[in-house]
Amino acid sequence: MENEKNMKKVNKTSFTKKLLQWFDTNERPLPWKGEKNPYYIWLSEIILQQTRVAQGLPYFEKFKKHFPEIKDLADASEDTVMKLWEGLGYYSRARNLHTTAKFIAYELAGVFPTTHEEILKLKGVGPYTAAAISSFAYDLPHAVVDGNVYRVLSRVFGIETPIDTTLGKKQFAALATGLLATKQAGKYNQAIMDFGATHCLPANPKCKTCPLQEQCVAFATQKISILPIKSKKIKKRERHFNYLVLKSETSILIHKRIEKDIWQNLYDFPLIEADQFIDKEAIIANDFFQQLIGEQTYTLTKTSKPFKQLLTHQKIMAIFWEFTLNQPIKDIPANFILINQKNIPNFAFPKIIDWYLKDKSLYLELF
């Protein structure tokens, strides 16, 4: 009831008008702004899912340069796509991007869908992304609802329904649709996202110069810091990775992660996962290590410092055990490949392995 009362207090027409006026003089200059090519809009939106603009911008430019047409992306190898995506995280986006490019290029004759309903059917495209593409490319009247939009609407309209609940998602979606400037859908959607990203910030929002201050319920009730509300706290699973860096002369063994786990289709080193970090004796006694090494001799040359990578639901801790073998591994298991050490940069690795490789490079401890 309190939410409904607050929403009635705010003049929706005034909200939309002021937001568009603000946008006229405060638009962020970004390379995909004003773009009408749905391929580039889709590409930018997939890259920006769960990614800051500053981080995503060079990836957009890189993909646009390597794949100027959607068929170029479709025809690329998966390893090429994953390598270009390397470091951006949430790698399922890259896999979905590649799958969808092939679908459009081969099944739809290279023609990007032109309706919201068809766009929504594309792999990796959810309600927000479909609304963004359809409004920016075709000016169709579909409202976007992302983190910036949740924040702006919850504060201005004083909505305390948690944004991560079914009720909250429905409530915000309905409000966003009701506020949409239907004849300027693309401009309105960009305006509210820019406003949340540059003005109505998560911390230290610019309330003193806010054009919506007079009608902002959160400002009037001093609830800026608590809105929007989330009901759930993510519990992170902690995993300990012991990576085996097995070198012999110029070769090194790497592994392609094909299982439905984190980093699917990226490469890493042979892995012993345990509940906690284990010592040298446990590594050497491990069945997997013994299977890889066989009867040959080896030397443990170095153990790295611990590296940590935080994912949405997991915390990965990794130590790299560097072994020098007297000869290359002969019996190579499935999904493992023996490569020349100088070719390591040609493969896409998770961030935690990139950090390890860069750390070695920093100290000139090259393979």
Image (spheres, grey):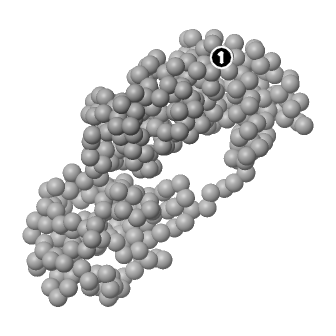
**In the image, is residue 112 above or below residue 90?**
above
SS at badge 1: helix
The part of the image, by quadrant, that contains residue 365 is: bottom left
Question: Which residue is rendered at x = 36% and y = 30% of the image?
Answer: 110
Q: Position of residue 134 (x, y in %)?
A: 54, 25
- Tell me the quarter of the image containing the C terminus: bottom left
**In the image, is residue 294 above or below residue 172?**
below
Question: Which residue is rendered at x = 89% and y = 30% of the image?
Answer: 5
Q: Position of residue 103 (x, y in %)?
A: 39, 40
The part of the image, by quadrant, that contains residue 179 is: top right
Along the viewing direction, whichever of 103 and 164 lies nearer the viewer: 103
Along the viewing direction, whichever of 288 and 312 lies nearer the viewer: 288
Residue corresponding to mark 1: 182
**In the image, is residue 197 above or below residue 210?**
below
Question: Which residue is rendered at x = 35% and y = 34% of the image?
Answer: 105
The part of the image, by quadrant, that contains residue 199 is: top right
Q: Position of residue 363 (x, y in %)?
A: 21, 57
**In the image, is residue 142 above or below residue 274?**
above
Q: Is residue 202 left or right of residue 84?
A: right
- Tell me the quarter of the image containing the N terminus: top right
Q: Position of residue 326 (x, y in %)?
A: 11, 79
One can see residue 315 in this view: yes
Q: Is residue 111 left or right of residue 222?
A: left
